[in-house]
Amino acid sequence: MSILVNKNSKILVQGFTGTEGTFHATQMIEYGTNVVGGVTPGKGGTSHLDKPVFNTVADCVKTTAADTSIIFVPPAFAADAIMEAAEAGIKLVVCITEGIPVQDMVKVKNYLQGKSTRLVGPNCPGVITAGECKVGIMPGFVFIPGRIGIVSKSGTLTYEAADQVAKAGLGISTAVGIGGDPIIGTTTKEAVELFMNDPETDAIVMIGEIGGGMEAEAARWIKETGNKKPVVGFIAGQTAPPGRRMGHAGAIVGGADDTAAAKMKIMTECGIHVVSSPADIGKKMAEVIKK
Amino acid sequence: MNLHEYQAKELLKKYNVTVQEGFACSTVHEAEEAYRQIKTQYGSNFAVVKAQIHAGGRGKGTVKETGINGVKVAKSAEDVVDISKKLLGGTLVTLQTGPAGKVVNKILVAQDMYYDGVSDRKEFYLSILLDRTKGQNVIMYSTEGGMNIEDVAHDTPEKIFKEWVHPSGGLQGFQARKIAFNLGLSGDAFKNMVKFVTNLYHAYVGLDCSMLEINPLFKAADNKIVAVDCKMNLDENALMRHADLASLRDITEEDPTEVEAGKYNLNFVKLDGNVGCMVNGAGLAMATMDMIKLSGGEPANFLDVGGTANAQTVEAGFKIILKDPAVKAILINIFGGIVRCDRVAQGVIDAYKNLGNIHIPIIVRLQGTNAVEAKKLIDESGLEVQSAILLSEAADLVKKAVA
């Protein structure tokens, strides 16, 4: 089962024929991901990487029955691409694009309300279900199949965590990179909830960073629902100075939960196993699982 | 991207937002001329001279060299000359600049708004920003203007109001009226406030602001509603659709090393510690800084070299970090995914040889694709570089380096 994607997922690539789209679609196919086609407006009817290219997402869905989309289009057109995928009935949209204007994402978030489409990202490494399906840009070999779920705001830190989990003798069910932008589709809490309900996940690694209140929201939810599965947590940015852009919003709204210290405190109070060093994530998970 | 007050006010005027009028000046002569124009135009001997720097708290801040405050009222042309001389070229230190302060290259000579009239003057606060949790823009406002809003939020939270704006519907008339009522206005002042708020919201959206703050938002004695000060931040991701706004960037306000790093497409933030670091990915970079601290050092910088760490980026990173004499060691932490570690290792070796003369310990931690080959390359290079594969090993090496 795992979450979000598996070997039966049918993936379409938006921005298929571009440099990024081509490179990562190739890697995804090599991993064994079922890429059924792609979309590049104006190139419909051609073929790329031995897969059909369509002008619109709707055309692609009609022909291939694609249910998942990964987006590599440039930031100016990415919001439009997300909405097009949602309109065509895509169930899961993974947006890799970095640098989308915030006001565009305000519109997207609103547009998706009431629709059955789930968005992951933007500005994220994507989603991988180990050994089955890679919808993202992460190095597949790091994710050894197993029963630990990862949710993270960061790319390379996710790979680091997966690697440590593997070195501790454990493996990954699904890893979800939710992205580091101020407005993202799937929140930390939503990803944690999916893992809590997944019979193939035994424990969760939750990686956050300074800015926003998502980790606190997730932590409170975990406590309220009775800490059903152990969660190991890490917050990056304990040494980040206030007011500097390293993912920090710097606003009064939600300001109380903004710092790493504040988030770590709330997470600890909610029964999450918080590590202060990023080098201890795997070790801590092994320790917690044995109990 | 931060803008100066004078730049922000010019932009607001294009959206019919009433602002305290003034002239941005770079010389004492220009300031004197600006004063004459203001005197003729508004028939008052008073004018306000304000230092233009990217930091708040200017009124209470002082210029190191001359002891003058960053905002002064002038009563005559002689006053303007005297104040301008003391401000221009000086280093203004405020609560927000830190002890180093910021050099004043421009001043704004502006009309005095505190004239007498039919009604009382009032100072309010109003800002528009993004509520990340709701995914909506929020207008935050208060009857308590002219002071630090974070203090108001802390001491008297009941005096802060919030109005969320629907993403597709936009700001509605009833919302603008609610704001004006909550600020206790009536008559002409009420009407002017409704117009002001409506136009200000259009400016916020039209300019792709990430934050727009008017403090004080001023009700003059003739019931005009005016932006006396303005702090505007633009969303850098949106500059691609505002070619005209990109040119408003003032790099003299930024750390020169950060500006140089930007030229190499490196995401760099200067800090005060003794261990430099170079990392791929923002999250891992922050985590590496945290690890340096836990190992007994202090991070000297944040540096994300991005997805493609090669010899050029590594060399640029070295140069930038080594500019800081406080740096006693450098930790390079790369998790190679699609980028191969042996290539990065070769990049580090080449950069090290090109630069020569590196007299501080370099610790390289490479993990991921071809990590073992990479470690071998480094270990056999004959250079004074220590290598690690596990993050915990790197932490131990940092510990030794700073001990």
Image (tube, coloured by chain):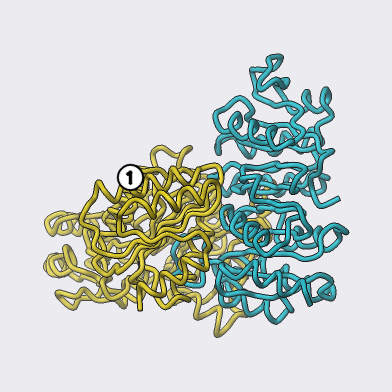
The residue indicated by pointer 1 is B263
Q: Is residue B204 left or right of residue A170?
A: left
Q: Nearer the viewer, residue B206 or A244?
A: A244
Q: Is residue B342 left or right of residue B401?
A: right
At label 1, the amino acid type is Lys
B108 to B355, vertically: above or below: below
Snapshot quadrant of residue B40: bottom left
Q: Nearer the viewer, residue A32 or B117?
A: A32
Q: Is residue A68 visible?
A: yes
Q: Is residue B168 left or right of residue B288?
A: right
B154 to A245, vertically: above or below: below
Q: Position of residue B250 (x, y in %)?
A: 30, 52
- Letter of the chain shown cyan in the rendering: A
- Letter of the chain shown yellow in the rendering: B
Q: Position of residue A192 (x, y in %)?
A: 76, 62
Q: Chain of mark 1?
A: B
- The quarter of the picture where the C terminus of chain B appears is bottom left
Q: Residue at x 66, y 22 (%)?
A: A49
